[in-house]
Amino acid sequence: MDLLNYVFYFFGVILIVGGIFGNNLPMFLLGVIIALPPLLEKGLRRSERRDSSSDDVLSLILDEREGCVLKALIKSDNPLRLSEIAAIAGLSKVTTYRLLRRLAARGAVLVVKDDTSRVKRYYINPKLRELFETHIKSV
């Protein structure tokens, strides 16, 4: 939303709250009329974005950045280090680390620790890899 829509939304919410607490129906309705269009516009933009990317299976269950990390792991047959994943996905190391922790908590990514060094390597869950490879072959 641009600045003007935020302003309309803000004043609409103020009028809604004032109408509720002041038992003033016209003020409440005016607030709804002012605040609703920016919300509808934002919702329509989200649904358009979701519809346009529905061909990609990853976008249905993951956000865009998580999808980039998983795609980087799918392309590799060997476990990758954090820096390698960040470079392939085009994300910072901090963001990539947070996304990998989130994906590991869901079980989508597995972590291997090297005993000789303190380096963690990440790879995609084999069952998830099979699922995506099956889907890619069927499409």
Image (spheres, rainbow, N blue to C red):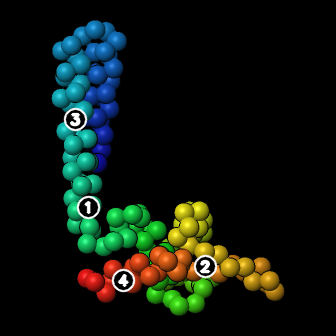
Q: Position of residue 50 (x, y in %)?
A: 27, 61
Q: Earlier in the sequence, mark 2 or mark 1?
A: 1
Residue placed under numbered mark 2 in the picture: 122
Q: Secondary structure at mark 1?
A: helix
Q: Position of residue 46 (x, y in %)?
A: 27, 54
Camera-side residue: 43 or 128?
Answer: 128
Q: Does residue 126 appear anywhere in the picture?
A: yes
Q: What label does residue 49 carry, if any?
A: 1
Q: Earlier in the sequence, mark 4 or mark 3?
A: 3
On the picture, is 134 further left or further right than 23? Answer: right
Residue placed under numbered mark 4 in the picture: 134
Q: Earlier in the sequence, mark 4 or mark 1?
A: 1
Residue at x 52% of width, y 80% of height: 126
Q: Earlier in the sequence, mark 2 or mark 4?
A: 2
Q: Secondary structure at mark 3?
A: helix
Kind of residue sitting beneath label 1: Arg
Q: Nearer the viewer, mark 4 or mark 1?
A: 4
Kind of residue sitting beneath label 3: Leu
Q: CA distance from mark 2 to mark 4?
A: 22 Å
Vertical position of residue 78 compared to residue 18: above or below: below
Residue placed under numbered mark 3 in the picture: 36
Kind of residue sitting beneath label 4: Thr
Quadrant in the picture for residue 83: bottom right
Kind of residue sitting beneath label 2: Tyr
Q: Nearer the viewer, mark 2 or mark 1?
A: 2
Vertical position of residue 90 compared to residue 94: above or below: below
Residue at x 22% of width, y 35% of height: 36
Check disc 1: other Cα within 10 Å, few if <14, some if 14-19, many if 20+: few
Q: Secondary structure at mark 4?
A: helix
Quadrant in the picture for residue 79: bottom right
Camera-side residue: 106 or 39?
Answer: 106
